[in-house]
Amino acid sequence: MEYDIKNAELAPGGRLRIDWASTEMPVLKGVKERFHDDRPFAGMRVSACMHVTTETANLMVALQQGGADVVLAASNPLSTQDDVAAALVAHYEIPVYAIKGEDVETYHKHINAVLDHQPHIIMDDGCDLVSTLHKNRRDAKSNIIGGTEETTTGIIRLRAMAKDGALEFPMMAVNDAMTKHLFDNRYGTGQSTMDGVIRATNYLIAGKNVVVAGYGWCSRGIAMRARGLGGNVIVTEIDPLKALEAVMDGFRVMPMIEAAPIGDIFVSATGNINVFDTHHFAVMKNGALLANSGHFDVEINIRGLTKMAVEQPKRVRPFVDQYVMADGRRLNVLGEGRLINLAAAEGHPASVMDMSFANQALAARYLIDNQGKLENKVYSVPEEIDQEIARIKLAAMDIQVDVLTTEQDKYLNSWEEGTV
């Protein structure tokens, strides 16, 4: 078995952490048991490009239980948990190509390694796997049934491909599932982002001005958690409806150029480029922290910041690079501008990834069950899968909900009755 990991001796600890995460993933556990009985992926090769974490490991094992021949590469150079990668290789015989801190050349080499697998199903986290396959690895396309995409950033790219007529197989927008973005994006990103900022800096959040770029589901979660820690939260937006919602939720809203001089901590999760740019750096206060929780490391214009700095950045803490401006101000970039929640922390809690990865697994099965029936476009996860995952999650939490009476169901499906 070929693979590329940091250190195989880390495997025992990785397995313990994988098992620990599994106790918080009852929905995926149920899916895994069903897969074990049904074997829906028998004879299928699955190539995944995802964050190599304990939660992802449990998804890979579930697919393997369903008969899949699985390989995994990292979807970000800093998001790999090396002990988890080692455990997947040693204890589950799943080839992994991922090393925390790998350079960009190695990152792309690893993506190509999983495409060498000639997959039937691909699982992507940011669309790099799909993009590479379409642009440079068309030899790996012949067996593709379809794929799944986990992230907002990836869905943006996929929809652009579909609009241009470039997408050559169906993709499932896992990120659009209600049980994914309402919970993973908001509660997962909110908690894990602030966890990453705190682990990287050991800063007290209370009393700090925290500037959150965007007010999509991820940024909503970050703003909520920053406020919960005592931060004075400022939101910047380009969408008037989202800006209005942020105001109604009790946050200050202003343009980034107005927030730049007063912010202490800046966090972006927009999926866009240069959200924090050179004209913002020029007016930021001494000691400002810059963090990114969007998928790619483009939200902070690090290239521009490097040109503005009067000396090479200095690593003052393991995940803090300090840039000195001409006037002596020091700006601090966290986690090299990559996903701070995975660069400096452990990513989302397992209990929220439970629903996201159950969506991944069931969406992949949907592709197989509907092979040859789907067009080359981006599909939402069917509502019945979403509802099923929510029901299983509630049951695992020992929470029950009401059921409509026959009379209520009839009323909701009729039009005759009104004011009596």
Image: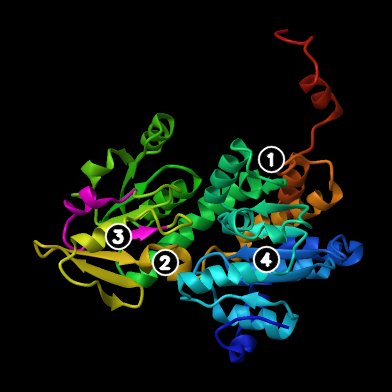
Q: CA distance from mark 2 to mark 1?
A: 35 Å
Q: Residue at left 74%, top 70%?
A: 70
Q: Is residue 52 visible?
A: no
The percent coordinates of residue 395 (x first, y second) are 75, 54
Q: Secondary structure at mark 1?
A: loop
- 98 lies left or right of 403: left
Q: Answer with the quarter of the image where residue 335 lies.
A: bottom left
Q: CA distance from mark 2 to mark 4?
A: 31 Å
- Compared to residue 110, the image places residue 208 above or below, namely above
Dot 2 amino acid type: Gly
Q: Which residue is mark 1?
A: 377
Q: CA distance from mark 1 to mark 4?
A: 21 Å
Q: Which residue is mark 4?
A: 115
Dot 3 amino acid type: Arg
| Disc number for residue 303 | 3
- Compared to residue 302, the image places residue 394 above or below, namely above
| Disc number for residue 369 | none
User: In terms of sequence position, does the residue under pointer 1 or pointer 4 come before the other?
Assistant: 4
Q: Which residue is mark 2?
A: 196
Dot 1 amino acid type: Lys
